[in-house]
Image (cartoon, rainbow, N blue to C red):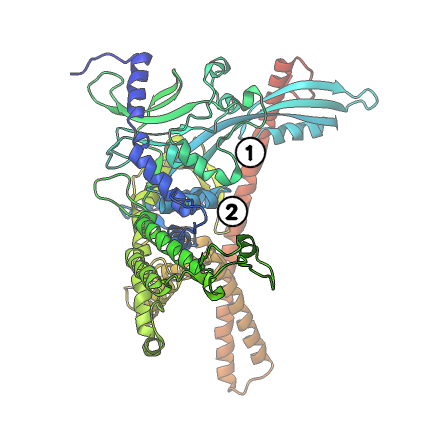
């Protein structure tokens, strides 16, 4: 029954803390599996090693991971866009929004400073461990700096203030103002400028920090999703707008806070560090204990659970607000039915690595024993002489020894086991190859078999192996990557508060997500065969050939836009991102106008040359000559008229732009005078150029 009463902070904290403690990361089995997977990838010891015996570790897990990630990087981080938004209707406004969404979302995800490392690490996490997770969000930060200027006159001051008044400037204060006594009309001024910037970010979430309810079937339906934030300082919280007094009460992160510190220790072993302690021991650099949670809860008591964003630190709740989204995207290489967290390709090779490690160790120990066998030594042999190895050294027997010197030291025969051990290792290689698709075409073939091999068989083996990793790529595209693209569009549409300009395909575009109104379907461009650029190129060449034949036949099945789409995919398949460097987009009129103007100029030049030739003499009859001249002159007049019309249109567009610019400049001057007046009032200083 609904309680019809809003929860208190203590009630909310109790429920949230209990839900957090039941997260899957606190399940010992889940943590143990991930620890062992990372150890196997790093070839860490199993713990059963014996002194003075081989301790080699087979690199099967590392091999399968390092063979997968190049294909995944090529598919997702190459020139082609892996996920696209598609229009639900043929409405022009909706189709324009789809184009903007595709350009902007892909730009935000793929073209940031952090993009490659974050996204590559995300996929590699999923290749090694049971899942990899990223978190995406809009971050508002404030930065304050002092800007000093010396010897400014009135015009220079006006320009400086105009330059400072950018969109990201939230506050300008004058903290220093002094007139130059030796140069009247010149003065020194110091501004304190506070800038606020809004930035979209994607960050990787380590496995031991990701929180999701036990037995969840998906992130979207999980009762609780979140992460433990272990890299946020008190100073960063201040810059994000939290009250300084509250921040001062928050608990400092303890070194052993991580629920899975063993995993963190394994990861950081080679750097000699198990915690990220502050380098500078100062209040603003202290790491704060934070947990960022998105929980389904009936906070308002209406009987219906809703998704809420809870940011807590110790017993303090810093954020408590409705938030109808889970800003996390999770990848697993192998999808498991009815589970939010699947399996990794590394898991498929764990058993193989352990068995092969034991076999290879036995093989190594056997080789050592055969190469340096132990000996049976008679009691009459002087052990000091025997154990001290020196060139041409003598081994003495006791003076009254009756033993035959040839029988005093007898080698202990160790049967060589290399052949059966190598055959067993090869068997397990084949088992692993069947599981992962990493077939070695020449493995186990003798000379006669190799001579009978055909290109068809090798291609078949290669294709069967590719199918495994291509299925992994498809699974990742349809789960985590789809969620990341959908979530990015949702995030900027809800929280980006202004338009922004970006450079896409060599062109500056203005994008305003606040005007997005449609919920578009999302389609994966990653399918079977998509992992190979060569396959894509071959396929698109075939399609392009059919389109060109249809075009020549005048078929309505193909138009310029369809040809451009094929050429675009073909160009991206070859590894080039900027299609407009090679082809004009028929759906962008400005590109076609430029091309038409160039063609028009070429036609005009050809016509002029032909006319000059006619005027210089032509073997045609006089009547034909006059007729040809008349036709050429009429063509020139038509071409000139078209060119004049387009030139006039461009001039009119330029004039309107100049008028608009002048009006904006006039308004900026008025705003500048007003701002100077406001600065005078705020600072108590007399500033030239103000309105009073």
Q: Secondary structure beneath disc 1?
A: helix
* Above or below for 295 versus 499: above
Query: Between residues 338 and 417, which one lies in front from this camera angle?
Result: 417
Disc 2 crowd rating (10 Å Cα; few below 14, some 14-19, many 20+) is: few
The label nearer to you, 1 versus 2, is 1
Residue 660 rendering spot, x and y as whole percentages:
53, 38
Residue 201 screen position, x and y as percent: 45, 36
Residue contact at pointers 1 and 2, CB within 8 angstroms: no
* Residue 177 at least partly seen: yes
Task: For label 1, count other residues whose C-alpha is less than 10 Å away and answer few (under 14), some (14-19) or many (20+).
Answer: few
Q: Nearer the viewer, residue 479 or 390?
A: 390
Q: Residue at x 70, y 22 (%)?
A: 189
Q: Residue at x 33, y 55 (%)?
A: 469
Q: Earlier in the sequence, mark 1 or mark 2?
A: 2
Q: Which residue is mark 2?
A: 653
Which x, y percent locates residue 152? 74, 27
Q: Quadrant of the C terminus?
A: top right
Residue that label 1 marks: 664
Q: Is residue 501 left or right of residue 222?
A: right
State the residue at coordinates (35%, 52%): 358
Dot 2 falls on a residue whose secondary structure is helix
Residue farthest front in this picture: 400
């Amino acid at each position: 029954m609904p309680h019809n009463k809003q929860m208190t902070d203590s009630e909310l904290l109790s429920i949230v803390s209990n839900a957090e403690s039941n997260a899957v990361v606190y399940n010992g089995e889940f943590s143990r599996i991930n620890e062992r997977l990372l150890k196997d990838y790093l070839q860490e010891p199993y713990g059963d090693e014996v002194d003075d015996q081989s301790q080699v570790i087979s690199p099967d897990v590392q091999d399968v991971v390092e063979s997968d990630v190049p294909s995944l990087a090529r598919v997702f981080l190459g020139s082609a866009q892996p996920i696209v938004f598609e229009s639900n209707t043929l409405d022009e406004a909706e189709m324009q929004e789809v184009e903007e969404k595709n350009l902007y979302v892909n730009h935000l995800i793929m073209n940031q400073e952090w993009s490659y490392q974050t996204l590559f690490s995300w996929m590699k996490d999923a290749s090694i461990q049971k899942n990899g997770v990223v978190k995406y969000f809009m971050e508002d930060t404030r930065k304050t700096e002092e800007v000093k200027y010396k010897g400014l006159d009135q015009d220079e001051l006006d320009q400086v203030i105009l330059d400072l008044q950018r969109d990201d400037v939230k506050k300008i204060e004058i903290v220093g103002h002094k007139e130059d006594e030796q140069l009247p009309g010149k003065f020194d001024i110091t501004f304190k400028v506070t800038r606020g910037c809004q930035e979209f970010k994607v960050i990787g979430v380590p496995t031991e920090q990701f929180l999701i309810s036990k037995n969840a079937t998906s992130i979207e339906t999980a009762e609780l999703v979140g992460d433990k934030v272990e890299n946020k300082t008190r100073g960063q919280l201040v810059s994000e707008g939290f009250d300084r007094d509250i921040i001062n009460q928050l608990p400092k992160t303890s070194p052993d806070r991580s629920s899975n510190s063993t995993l963190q220790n394994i990861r950081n072993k080679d750097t000699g560090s198990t915690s990220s302690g502050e380098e500078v021991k100062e209040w603003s650099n202290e790491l704060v204990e934070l947990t960022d949670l998105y929980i389904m809860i009936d906070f308002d008591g209406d009987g219906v659970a809703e998704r809420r964003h809870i940011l807590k630190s110790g017993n303090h709740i810093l954020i408590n607000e409705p938030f109808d989204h889970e800003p996390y995207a999770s990848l697993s290489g192998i999808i498991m039915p009815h589970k939010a967290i699947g399996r990794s390709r590394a898991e498929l090779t764990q058993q193989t690595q352990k068995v092969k490690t034991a076999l290879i160790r036995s093989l190594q120990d056997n080789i050592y024993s055969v190469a340096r066998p132990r000996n049976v030594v008679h009691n009459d042999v002087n052990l000091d002489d025997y154990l001290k190895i020196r060139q041409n050294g003598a081994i003495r027997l006791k003076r009254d020894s009756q033993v035959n010197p040839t029988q005093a030291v007898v080698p202990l025969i160790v049967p060589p086991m290399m052949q059966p051990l190598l055959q067993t290792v090869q068997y397990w290689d084949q088992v692993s190859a069947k599981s992962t698709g990493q077939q070695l075409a020449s493995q186990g073939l003798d000379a006669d078999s190799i001579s009978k091999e055909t290109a068809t068989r090798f291609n078949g083996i290669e294709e069967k192996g590719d199918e495994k990793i291509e299925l992994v790529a498809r699974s990742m595209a349809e789960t985590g990557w789809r969620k990341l693209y959908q979530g990015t569009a949702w995030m900027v549409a809800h929280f980006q508060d202004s338009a922004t300009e970006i450079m896409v395909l060599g062109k500056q575009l203005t994008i305003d997500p606040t005007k997005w109104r449609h919920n578009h379907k999302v389609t994966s461009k990653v399918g079977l065969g998509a992992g190979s650029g060569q396959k894509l190129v071959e396929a698109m060449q075939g399609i392009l050939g059919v389109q060109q034949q249809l075009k020549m036949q005048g078929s309505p099945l193909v138009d310029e836009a369809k040809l451009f789409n094929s050429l675009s995919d073909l160009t991206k398949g070859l590894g080039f991102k900027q299609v407009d460097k090679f082809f004009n987009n028929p759906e962008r009129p400005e590109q076609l106008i430029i091309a038409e103007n160039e063609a028009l100029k070429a036609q005009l030049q050809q016509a002029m040359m032909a006319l000059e030739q006619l005027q210089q003499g032509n073997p045609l009859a006089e009547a034909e000559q006059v007729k040809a001249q008349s036709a050429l002159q009429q063509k020139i007049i038509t071409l000139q008229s078209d060119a004049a019309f387009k030139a006039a249109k461009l001039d009119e567009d330029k004039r309107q732009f100049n008028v608009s610019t002048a009006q904006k400049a006039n308004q900026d001057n008025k705003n500048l005078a007003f701002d100077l007046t406001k600065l005078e009032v705020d600072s108590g200083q007399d500033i030239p150029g103000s309105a009073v």
